[in-house]
Image (cartoon, grey):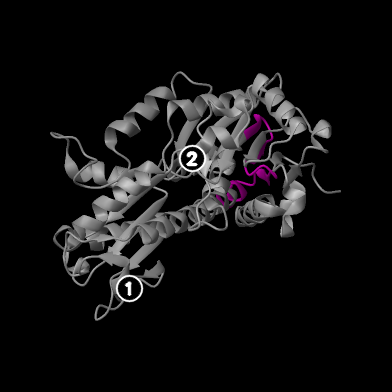
């Protein structure tokens, strides 16, 4: 028997019946299902997609994210349903053709909500899918990208991408903007790289004459980060040794000014397409890194002859013959107290006696003060965080 659904998405699109192929809802559903498959979940069983007609049969105990595609036509039944969802405090993402006319494209009940704009550069609705997956806790809500570049060749593009990604709610690391004065530069740089979802590599003609670019790429490989590589136009060619990156070959027409000018920037359309591409690479990266952590956890548990079951929600259940069972939550990036609180609540909802919760992460490059803080929190919180390098010792003593 297939496991019951774990996640629910409600798609509302008044007038969709008049649109060939199902409109935006159909494209969003396809993108969500693709990302679920990448995460190792069976889309047909893990996700239930609801519409206005099927909503009354929803499971109130499962996570729900709603997307409302606004437009000039509005439906009274959809508006009433949105009011119900708002009254229950549930997540709604309004998506409209133009934010400048937002209030005319959504019912008044959605006016206070910060909406999303449809963009021609994002036909698969990657931005919308990412926000939905974050709300369902299938992607982490902190969206972190690290820009690696050679300053005297591409500082104009680097700053432009910093601003564009920041406007899309990414936490962007750029060396000239992201480390406060007086902080120890190199440990903070490695910490931010270790907590990133994606490395954005600006492959300019002499980028790899910089020892920092070379080291950043090597460490990103060790962390299994997503790698999006912007390759400068000919006569420059893709740098050897970067074959594991996802390439995006730039043309002279992508630049506002000569590509050889370090101050030149990209045309707006190229920037928009690049940000959408970053969303897709980020989602795949998080999935592959999560799978790597799960595989390592299973290997270590089996080495200790402990039963471990990968749940359809993505976490692991470790069964110990004398200590009961523990929920293991594989994490991409670094833990924080808010995440530990959330996981403690998830364990408590199982009911008494609630299982132990353990959040497992890759500590490569973590800042020493952050590491000390996490170990201090472990003395007080019911849900602990543990580097994956220490899991084996923990299994042997707990």
Q: Is residue 300 magenta?
A: yes
Q: Nearer the viewer, mark 1 or mark 2?
A: 2
Q: Which numbered tag is attached to residue 315?
A: none
Q: Quadrant of residue 21?
A: bottom right
In the image, is 83 to the left or to the right of 202? right
Q: Which numbered tag is attached to residue 251?
A: 1
Q: Which residue is pictured at 57% across the width and 34% down the height?
A: 104
Task: From the top left corner, tell me how far across and down residue 169 is, in percent.
Answer: 41, 40
> In the rendered image, is residue 398 in sight?
no
For disc 2, the marked residue is 99
Task: From the top left corner, tell me how far across and down residue 23 is, in percent.
Answer: 68, 53
SS for dot 2: helix
Span colored in magenta: 299-326
Query: Closer to the N terminus: mark 1 or mark 2?
Result: 2
Q: Quadrant of residue 75?
A: top right
Q: Residues within 10 Å of mark 1 (few under 14, many from 20)?
A: few
In the image, is 73 to the left or to the right of 116? right
Q: Which residue is pictured at 69% across the width and 36% down the height?
A: 74
Please state which of residues 299 and 377 is positioned toward the viewer in this rendering: 377
Q: Residue furthest bottom?
A: 235
> In the rendered image, is residue 96 in sight?
yes
Per the model, the C-alpha gap separating discs 1 and 2 is 30 Å
Please state which of residues 41 and 91 is positioned toward the viewer in this rendering: 91
Which quadrant of the rendered structure holds the C terminus? Answer: top right
Q: Is residue 287 magenta?
A: no
Q: Which residue is pictured at 31% across the width and 75% down the height?
A: 238
Q: Is residue 279 above or below residue 93?
A: below
Task: From the top left corner, tell me how far across and down residue 264 is, in percent.
Answer: 20, 61
């Amino acid at each position: 028997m297939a496991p019951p659904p774990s996640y629910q998405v409600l798609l509302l699109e008044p007038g969709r019946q008049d649109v060939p192929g199902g409109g935006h809802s159909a494209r969003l559903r396809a993108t969500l299902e693709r990302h679920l498959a990448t995460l190792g979940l069976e889309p047909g069983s893990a996700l239930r997609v609801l519409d206005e007609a099927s909503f009354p049969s929803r499971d109130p105990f499962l996570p729900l994210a709603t997307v409302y595609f606004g437009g000039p036509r509005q439906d009274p039944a959809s508006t009433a349903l949105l009011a119900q969802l708002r009254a229950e405090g549930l997540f709604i993402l309004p998506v409209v053709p133009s934010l400048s006319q937002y209030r005319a494209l959504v019912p008044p009940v959605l006016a206070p909500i910060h909406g999303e704009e449809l963009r021609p550069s994002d036909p698969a609705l990657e931005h919308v899918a990412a926000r939905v997956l974050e709300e369902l806790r299938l992607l982490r809500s902190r969206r972190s990208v690290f820009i690696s570049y050679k300053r005297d060749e591409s500082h104009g593009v680097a700053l432009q991408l910093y601003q564009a990604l920041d406007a899309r709610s990414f936490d962007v690391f750029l060396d000239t903007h992201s480390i406060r004065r007086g902080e120890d530069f190199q440990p903070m740089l490695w910490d931010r790289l270790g907590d990133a979802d994606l490395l954005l590599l600006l492959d300019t003609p002499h980028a790899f004459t910089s020892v920092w670019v070379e080291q950043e790429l090597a460490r990103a490989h060790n962390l299994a980060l997503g790698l999006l590589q912007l390759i400068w136009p000919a006569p420059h060619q893709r740098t050897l040794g970067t074959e594991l990156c996802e390439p995006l070959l730039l043309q002279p027409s992508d630049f506002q000014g000569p590509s050889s000018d370090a101050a030149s920037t990209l045309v707006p359309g190229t920037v928009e397409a690049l940000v959408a591409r970053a969303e897709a690479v980020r989602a795949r990266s998080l999935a592959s890194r999560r799978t790597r952590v799960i595989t390592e956890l299973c290997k270590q548990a089996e080495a200790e002859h402990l039963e471990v079951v990968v749940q359809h929600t993505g976490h692991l259940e470790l069964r110990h013959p004398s200590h009961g069972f523990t929920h293991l939550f594989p994490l991409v990036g670094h833990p924080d107290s808010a995440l530990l609180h959330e996981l403690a609540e998830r364990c408590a909802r199982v009911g008494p006696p609630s299982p132990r919760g353990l959040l497992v992460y890759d500590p490569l490059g973590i800042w020493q003060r952050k590491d000390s803080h996490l170990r201090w929190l472990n003395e007080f919180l019911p849900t602990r965080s543990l580097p994956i390098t220490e899991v084996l010792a923990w299994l042997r003593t707990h």
